[in-house]
Amino acid sequence: MEIHMALSKPIAPESLHDAPDIGQHYVECATENCNKNCQYYCNPCHRPMCEQCREEHFKNQATKNHEVVQYRQRTYQLPVEKCKDHPTKDIDMLCDECQVLLCSKCATANHRGHILTDLEAFYSERCKRCLEEIYKIHKYFLPTTQNLQKEIKEDATEIKIVLKDMRKIMKTEAETLKSLVDEMLSKNLEEADKVEESLIELLQSQDKTYSGYTSYLNDFIKELHGYLSPNDSLKLIIIAAKNLETQPIPDTSKPVLPIFTAGQYSKEVVSKLLGNIQISNTNPENRKIKPKEAVSIHLKPTVKQTKPSAEKQKLILSSSVTKIREFRVPAVGSACHLSMGKSGRLWVSDLWANLAEIDIEGNLLQKIRISFLGDNNGYHTVTRGGDLVYKDSNKKCIRRVTTDNKVIEFLKLGSWKPLSIYASLINGDILVGMKKNGKAKITRYRETGKEIQNILRETEGQELYRNPHYITENINGDICTSDIGKRAVVVVNKPGQRMFSYTGQNTEFHPYGICTDVLGHILVCDYDKWALFNSVHLLHQDGQFLCYVLTKEQGVQNPTSVCVDDENNLYVGHRDTNIVTVYKYLQ
């Protein structure tokens, strides 16, 4: 059995997610009477734990929804600092507008309405920033600088060889015309020595420059380590971000080698006979420094700064649902799936391989004709950066359409056929539902395309999915899936453990489009081609049925897609028409 221990050492790993903590130590499980090696970390509890204790943690009703991550991906705990004005309260917030540290009483008393940042998240982000910078130094700056110094030594060797060859030519010429060349030979040799001395002095100067830069990098590493110390934690918070950036590598130029021109044998032109050393007028060529972008560094998402959630807490379900407007989507025959983009833009797909992007007024912005026949699955999504991502069932891959309209193959799925896809707004991860040989799973990828998780079975070995054709993610990180094969909404937590399955309120439940809102509600379409139970269900995030938001009595026919915009408006798309209807259901 392979045992993963929280062992740290200053090496340069393949990616930051794989990077160990700096400072060599072993961490034991924090559970009482358990001395096993730590593999995981509960962020809400700030507790390291082994694999067995993690399983017990999830079984506990009080902690089953806690976020438990790999130890190296943990949230760093904020050192306790008491508020001077309220000694019983801990400092746990940063007022972005006033740039002061606060406790909860300070925030409500003097900073109401200001933008506040969770200090623990901010501190953890700065700790990770230091680790990222250390990682870049080990992975990029130090090796690149060492390579440049190696190149300087090679240049010095080449200069010596070239000048040695030139001397041989000079001496050969001089032997033939010994009586004529003694004086000129002496002069040329002296000139060659001066050129060599000048070039070597230049290279020695460059070498000293990079030696000094290497010393600076080592000192900067120590400085960054110092900021990670709990004793200096506040320095890390208040220090300017630019002071955490490594200074660029100094530029140097390669030496321009001299050229020797052989002379002609003639008494009158003795200087030409022996030749002379020439310094080229060519501008020095800068040494090639490997671009920093070539280093693969997976960064954690930045701390999101939001105003206090008083406005969110005021939102409740409205006693009645109000239709705000409806519009037809040009260039598509139906609205089988909706993906909300930036600035109110919306991507809509139909059954006939058409994808259309519209603006907030319903005007067509662009149209894409995909290479496979459209279907009734949630086969496209929009990333945090605004890129459209969609499946290609024929090629068994995922394609990305960048903001400058370039289509690239983003993920290859091998023999698995993609069904559905969703881009997380929490961390940017890509969730893909897929099938192969009667089996189904959901795979999580980083924004870079690195596969990091497969969700296939429950802990008891039972298969979680049969046909996961629509996916979304809730505000607590739960993955919510409409599985038409199981005729259920299957919800698992972030580690992939099943939380619940919702099978509807009638004997026939056909889950289609699914989304979540700012309160953690789950909204799912119940589409029946016989129009018996067409409706939109509203669930609590724990799986409890709350109400029918929309039913066929309210004019809803064949709903297959839903999404919620930034104004908490509900968009509903239909299988048999290109009309999208917008409702207000929260107040």
Image (cartoon, helix red, strand yellow):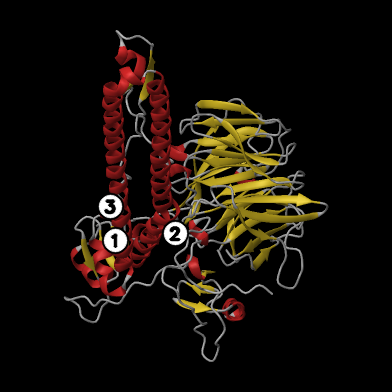
Q: Quadrant of residue 545?
A: bottom right
Q: Residue at x 71, y 56 (%)?
A: 441
Q: In this image, 496 relative to 382: left or right?
A: right
Q: Residue at x 65, y 54 (%)?
A: 443
Residue that label 3 marks: 212
Position of residue 587 measured from the top left corner of the image (x, y, whole percent): 42, 54
Residue 288 visible in the current orientation: no
Q: Quadrant of residue 373?
A: top right
Q: Select label 1 or label 2 by which is in front.
A: 1
Tag of residue 316:
2
Q: Verify CB contact (< 8 Å) between mark 3 and mark 2.
A: no
Q: Residue at x 51, y 63 (%)?
A: 476
Q: Select label 1 or label 3 by which is in front.
A: 3
Tell me which numbered mark, 3 or 2, is placed earlier along the sequence: 3
Toward the bottom, the furthest residue is 33
Tag of residue 114:
none
Residue that label 1 marks: 219
Give the Cα separation between the discs numbered 3 and 2: 62 Å
Determine whether 315 is above or below 148 in the image: below
Q: Give the amino acid at mark 3.
A: Gly
Give the Cα separation between the discs numbered 1 and 2: 55 Å
Q: Give the amino acid at mark 1.
A: Asp
Tell me which numbered mark, 1 or 2, is placed earlier along the sequence: 1
Position of residue 96 measured from the top left corner of the image (x, y, whole percent): 25, 57
Residue 83 visible in the current orientation: yes
Position of residue 585 measured from the top left corner of the image (x, y, whole percent): 49, 51
Q: SS for tag 1?
A: helix
Q: SS for tag 2?
A: loop
